[in-house]
Amino acid sequence: MRIICTAHGTGKEHDFQLFKRSKVKPISSLEVLADKGYQGINRIHNSSYIPFKKPKKKSLTFREKEYNRELARHRIYVEHVIRCLEIFRILA
């Protein structure tokens, strides 16, 4: 796993807003594993995966839950790298 690029903003800014403002275009051959905050990234990048959101007053199907778990198993490595960058203030 490699860090391809970074972007930063001033103050509190949602990750997806920062992503759109940075105008970084992911390479089409790469897969993007995003969290629920990146709803709509499929319109920007075709090879992107986001978890299913639970509808109000309903529950997710078994397949949706399994998909979310499998995606989380792959995304945890990304979250650990982000945490290390934040702890050591590499991005500050």
Image (cartoon, rainbow, N blue to C red):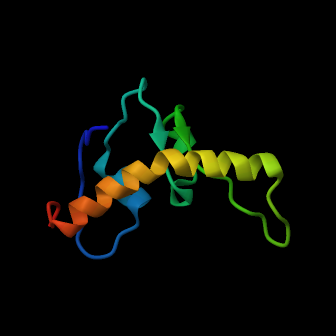
* Residue nearest the observer in this picture, 44 or 81: 81
| Residue at 57% in and 46% down | 71
Q: Quadrant of the N terminus?
A: top left
Image x and y of residue 86, in percent: 23, 66
Question: Total marks drawn?
Answer: 0
Q: Is residue 15 above or below residue 31?
A: below
Image x and y of residue 2, in percent: 27, 38
Image x and y of residue 17, in percent: 40, 60
Q: Quadrant of the C terminus?
A: bottom left
| Residue at 36% in and 28% down | 27
- Asked where in the image residue 29 lies, by quadrant, the reply is top left
* Residue nearest the observer in this picture, 35 or 40: 35
| Residue at 33% in and 75% down | 12
Q: Is residue 32 above or below residue 56?
A: above
Q: Is residue 91 above or below residue 70?
A: below
* Residue nearest the observer in this picture, 86 or 53: 86
Image x and y of residue 68, in percent: 64, 51
Q: Residue furthest bottom?
A: 11
